[in-house]
Image (cartoon, rainbow, N blue to C red):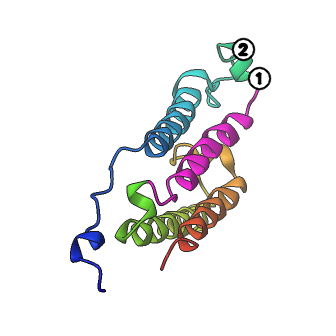
């Protein structure tokens, strides 16, 4: 006996699942951490002698602040690749995957184009060769989306 067509009706997926909210909070926290360090704590390299940043606990971390910030962003993006989030299902997977690949590619290309004088590019001027790691990390997160692609 064939089943009724009512059994195959898909229920609408929730847009704001707990996982998606956590992913958004992690991404926002990562961006906020980088901005707070760069604009508020980082000592101005143009001033001689160099001033100490405040609060000292964050200023002492130095470049690790960027690792914390970009790490939070990457983890947030990786968490958003789950099927319970809008970026983890349907067209969202393609958007997330291509978005991460393009951001990584643009980050690396921008670094190579301006590598002789990075002083005009915020955040990139502090990272130096670590800009390559940031671009590759974005591409790696793109592969987490690629594993969800059907």
> Picture coordinates of residue 71 (x, y %)?
65, 45
Q: Dot 2: few (<14), some (14–19), or many (≥20) neighbours within 10 Å?
A: few
Q: Secondary structure at mark 2?
A: helix
Instruction: Identify residue for label 1.
Output: 60
The picture places residue 24, in percent across and down from the top left corner, at 45, 42
Can you say whether 147 is above or below 141 in the image?
below
Which x, y percent locates residue 90? 37, 70
Magenta stretch, overall SS = helix
Question: Which residue in the structure is indicated by mark 2?
Answer: 56
Can I make out residue 124 in this image? no
Residue span colored magenta: 61-84
Checking the image for residue 78, the label placed there is none
Picture residue at 59% right of the left edge, 28% below the top = 37
Does the CB distance between marks 2 and 1 fall below 8 Å? yes
Please tell me in which quadrant of the rendered image residue 1 appears: bottom left
What's the residue at 58%, 61% (across, down)? Answer: 138
Q: Is residue 74 magenta?
A: yes
In the image, is 76 to the left or to the right of 128? left
């Amino acid at each position: 006996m064939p089943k009724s067509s009512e059994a195959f009706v898909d229920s609408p997926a929730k847009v704001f699942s707990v996982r998606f909210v956590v992913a958004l909070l992690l991404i926002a926290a990562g961006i906020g951490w980088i901005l707070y360090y760069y604009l508020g704590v980082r000592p101005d390299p143009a001033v001689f002698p160099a001033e100490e940043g405040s609060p000292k606990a964050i200023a002492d971390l130095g470049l690790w602040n960027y690792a914390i910030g970009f790490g939070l962003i990457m983890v947030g993006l990786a968490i958003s690749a789950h099927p319970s989030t809008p970026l983890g299902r349907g067209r969202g997977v393609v958007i997330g995957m291509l978005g991460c690949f393009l951001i990584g590619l643009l980050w690396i290309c921008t670094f190579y184009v301006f590598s002789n004088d990075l002083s005009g590019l915020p955040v990139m001027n502090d990272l130096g060769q670590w800009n390559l790691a940031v671009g590759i990390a974005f591409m790696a997160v793109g592969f987490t989306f690629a594993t969800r692609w059907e």
